[in-house]
Image: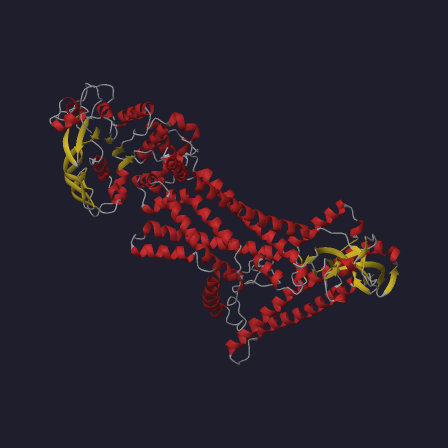
């Protein structure tokens, strides 16, 4: 990206979608990356999402907040169709990713997942070496060129701020890393396939504060290149890392606006009650 | 204090109630059951160890006088105390068992003699003991050595000459045997092949004359091999005759004389002169012969090498077959099959399969593998050998496949469990990177479940190696002339019958004509079977630990 991250005044988007000051910045001319329209989702007989409509902008961090069971993770997992793995899931409505319907019958899910990376709540490195963990996405895509793999592994580990800690032990098991390192390894693994979008499902919930701070810092750096959607239980975290925040409650999208607005001046009384800690 | 008895009884009741609530009785019960099980196992192993390990020890040969004045010579192998009836009368007198050897003279190897009839026990240092190729052991005195029927040594010089000449004679006999087995076997195989080719060609020609260019070289080869066969046979006979030239003149303690060719003496020793150290050496030499030697005397003597070999090869073939088969089946069941009543039924059927008596699998193996598949192979590929079956009869391949079928439920169940234990997050991580389901299974799920799969294979091997009943009808024999693996093309003979330690135990212990002599061998063979199962398992466990370390360096 040509815009340096430490110059908040430059390149403000012309559109009304603004970013809170002091929160980094969005790329110039932020465009709608994901467009959700009237999305409803059923787990068997139980409805988990009710007519969600929202636009998620590129090169921004969007946070999903809300109490447990509000459907924020379910929505996140719609974006790379991870919900396909669950039996009895029915989806209505549409999700357009850069203008392409991801529920279209002729869509290649594997291609979709290469474009939409994901980092999970619990770090889940493969029982393989650090190197193989990062190279995994390329290997399953059929890349065998050692030079390409080496370069990508280094670039991804640098991108995930893990290179300095891991460069001397690339052939050791990924499971030998600490919890925070494992989570950053998972992020490195996700960015190795060069996705457009990274989905993060409570990436810091199992980490201590120092590891959390490192991951958050990383999110800041990554957003110049990727669109990031993060589900979090921690409102402080949402306030710290995100440009826009969506509040969900009981499967409905209650409020979706700039992070500053959601936390300082929410339009909906339920949002206010939640962000001020009165329920949830 | 009218309520005092009442409160006492409630106190006791409370204490019992507390005891029951704490569950102490279950701790005692389960601990006791565990202890009993451990005791049984230790007892079993102890019995097998003690009976098995003493088998090779060269005990002193004892002389004693019987009541009628005739001496008896032999190794004391057992004794029984006097048994009284309730009234105090002697029901059965105390008696001692001697192994007297020289079966061809006495008609028996062992004899029970009442202790009261025995007196004057002594240990004569001059007594010799022979282990012979035939007729078992011989205990007696050495009177001389003959060369081609003429005495060349008397009692005083015989032992030294025997020591000198016996290895030569054994060597000659071994060479004769080698010719008979290897060279003549090869010539026979060539004759058979040529005959087969002629037979096929004649059948195809349907009565017409054969092309001389085809027929003549074959006939020549036949003639050449016939001549070679004759020559080898004479050579072997000459060697055998030469081996028999020297013979030991021996006598039993009661004066019977006998000559024993030196070539027929496997071991000659004077146990009563041997030091403990020499006996220990003899012990190990006998133990080594047991492991590496070939059986003699309808399996009651000699070694069990072919049986060890057969057991190991069969178990390995079984593992090689059962592992992929079981793993693939488990992956389909767990990952691809649509979970529903049908799959549930299949799973129940698999679990029940593990409980089916093994002989049922044997019958199935006989009907399906041997007759159906083996018979089909014979009709298709070896029609000219018929009616002699090639694969249409029991063999190591069919026995291994039958056992693979028997043990496949173990592998399926273990694999399914270890697949299920792979964390969901790990799979999702792989899928989220754009891996297909198949790639995820191969790259992530399979490696992570290898330790569990190997646990299943270990259990399957332990079960398979000890199984006897299905083998008896699918390819195990009492005595196999050839090993399934040898130096003759195609080296690995899957159609051959083989020997198996489990069957060997049954055969030696319960089917042999000389049960007393074979009894210790039963325990020794059992010990060996246990040892082999343990070694195979240890090997697999090491492999599993190695893989586990490789994939799951799990410290956080």
Number of numbered labels in the structure image: 0
B473 horizontally vs A4: left or right: right
Name the residue located 29 percent from the left edge and 39 percent from the top edge.
Answer: B432
The foreground one among A152 and A94 is A94
**Which quarter of the rendered picture does the C terminus of chain A lie within?**
top left
Name the residue located 80 percent from the left edge and 51 percent from the top edge.
Answer: B272
The foreground one among A197 and B329 is B329
**Which quarter of the rendered picture does the N terminus of chain A lie within?**
top left
User: In this view of the protein, can residue B488 be seen by the observer?
Assistant: no
User: In this view of the protein, can residue B320 be seen by the observer?
Assistant: yes
Name the residue located 53 percent from the left edge and 54 percent from the top edge.
Answer: B465
The foreground one among A238 and A128 is A238
B42 horizontally vs B144: left or right: left
Q: Position of residue B300 (x, y in %)?
A: 66, 60
**Colour style of the rendered protein structure:** secondary structure
Q: Position of residue A153 (x, y in %)?
A: 37, 32
Whether B126 is drawn above or below A80: the answer is below
Q: Residue furthest bottom?
A: B207
Q: Position of residue B204 (x, y in %)?
A: 50, 76
B555 horizontally vs B428: left or right: right
Q: Position of residue A147 (x, y in %)?
A: 39, 35
Whether B182 is drawn above or below A1: the answer is below
């Amino acid at each position: 990206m040509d815009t340096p991250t430490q110059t908040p005044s430059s390149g403000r988007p012309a559109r009304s979608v603004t970013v809170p000051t002091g929160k980094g910045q969005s790329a110039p001319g932020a465009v709608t990356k994901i467009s959700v329209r009237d999305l409803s989702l059923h787990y068997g007989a139980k409805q988990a999402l009710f007519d969600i409509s929202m636009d998620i902008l590129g090169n921004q961090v969007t946070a999903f907040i809300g109490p447990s069971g509000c459907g924020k993770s379910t929505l996140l997992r719609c974006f790379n169709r991870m919900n396909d793995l669950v039996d009895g899931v029915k989806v209505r409505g549409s999700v357009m990713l850069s203008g392409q319907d991801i529920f279209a019958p002729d869509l290649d899910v594997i291609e979709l997942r290469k474009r939409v990376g994901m980092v999970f709540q619990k770090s889940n490195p493969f029982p393989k070496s650090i190197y193989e963990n990062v190279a995994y996405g390329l290997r399953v895509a059929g890349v065998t060129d050692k030079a390409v793999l080496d370069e990508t592994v280094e670039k991804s580990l640098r991108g995930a701020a893990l290179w300095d800690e891991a460069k001397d032990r690339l052939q050791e098991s990924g499971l030998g890393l600490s919890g925070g390192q494992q989570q950053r390894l998972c992020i490195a693994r996700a960015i190795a396939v060069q996705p457009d979008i990274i989905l993060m499902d409570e990436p810091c919930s199992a980490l201590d504060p120092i590891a959390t701070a490192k991951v958050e810092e990383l999110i800041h750096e990554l957003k110049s290149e990727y669109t990031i959607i993060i589900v979090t239980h921690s409102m402080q975290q949402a306030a710290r890392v995100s440009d826009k925040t969506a509040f969900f409650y009981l499967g409905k999208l209650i409020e979706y606006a700039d992070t500053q607005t959601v936390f300082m001046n929410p339009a909906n009384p339920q949002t206010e009650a939640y962000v001020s800690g009165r329920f949830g | 204090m009218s309520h005092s008895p009442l409160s006492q009884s409630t106190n006791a009741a409370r204490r019992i109630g507390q005891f029951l609530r704490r569950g102490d009785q279950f701790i005692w019960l389960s601990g006791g059951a565990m202890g009993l099980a451990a005791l049984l196992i230790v007892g079993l192993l102890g019995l097998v160890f003690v009976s098995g390990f003493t088998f090779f020890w060269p005990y002193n040969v004892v002389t004693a006088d019987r009541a009628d004045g005739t001496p008896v010579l032999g190794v004391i192998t057992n004794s029984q105390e006097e048994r009284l009836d309730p009234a105090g009368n002697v029901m059965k007198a105390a008696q001692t068992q001697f192994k007297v050897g020289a079966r061809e003279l006495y008609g028996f190897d062992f004899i029970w003699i009442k202790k009261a009839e025995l007196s004057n026990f002594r240990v004569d240092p001059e007594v010799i003991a022979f282990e012979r190729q035939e007729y078992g052991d011989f205990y007696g005195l050495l009177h001389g050595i003959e060369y081609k029927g003429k005495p060349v040594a008397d009692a005083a010089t015989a032992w030294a000459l025997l020591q000198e000449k016996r290895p030569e004679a054994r060597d000659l006999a071994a060479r004769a045997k080698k010719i008979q087995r290897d060279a003549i076997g090869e010539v026979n195989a060539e004759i058979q092949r040529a005959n087969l080719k002629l037979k096929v060609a004649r059948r195809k020609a349907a009565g017409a004359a054969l092309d001389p260019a085809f027929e003549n070289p074959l006939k020549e080869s036949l003639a050449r091999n016939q001549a070679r066969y004759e020559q080898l046979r004479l050579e072997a006979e000459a060697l055998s005759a030469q081996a028999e030239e020297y013979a030991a003149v021996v006598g039993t303690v009661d004066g019977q004389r006998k000559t024993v060719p030196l070539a027929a003496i496997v071991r000659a020793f004077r146990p009563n002169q041997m030091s403990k150290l020499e006996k220990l050496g003899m012990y190990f030499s006998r133990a080594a012969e047991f492991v590496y030697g070939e059986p003699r005397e309808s399996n009651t003597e000699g070694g069990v090498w072919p049986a060890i070999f057969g057991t190991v090869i069969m178990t390995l073939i079984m593992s090689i077959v059962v592992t992929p088969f079981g793993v693939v089946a488990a992956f389909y069941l767990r990952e691809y099959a649509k979970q529903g009543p049908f799959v549930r039924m299949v799973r129940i059927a698999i679990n029940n399969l593990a409980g089916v008596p093994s002989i049922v699998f044997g019958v199935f193996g006989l009907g399906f593998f041997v007759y159906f598949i083996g018979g089909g192979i014979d009709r298709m590929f070896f029609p000219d050998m018929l009616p002699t079956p090639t694969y249409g009869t029991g063999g190591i391949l069919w026995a291994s496949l039958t056992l693979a079928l028997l043990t496949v439920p173990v592998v399926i169940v273990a694999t399914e469990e270890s697949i299920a234990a792979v964390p969901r997050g790990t799979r999702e991580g792989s899928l989220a990177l754009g891996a297909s389901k198949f790639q995820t299974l191969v790259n992530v799920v399979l490696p992570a479940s290898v330790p569990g799969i190997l646990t299943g294979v270990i259990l399957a091997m332990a079960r398979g190696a000890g199984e006897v009943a299905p083998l008896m009808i699918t390819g195990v024999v009492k005595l196999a002339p050839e090993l399934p693996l040898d130096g003759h093309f195609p080296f690995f003979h899957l159609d051959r019958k083989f020997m198996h330690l489990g069957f060997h135990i049954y055969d030696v212990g319960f089917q042999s004509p000389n049960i007393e002599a074979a009894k210790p061998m039963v325990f020794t063979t059992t010990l060996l079977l246990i040892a082999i199962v343990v070694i195979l398992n240890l090997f697999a466990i090491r492999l599993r630990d190695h893989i586990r370390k490789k994939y799951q360096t799990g410290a956080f």
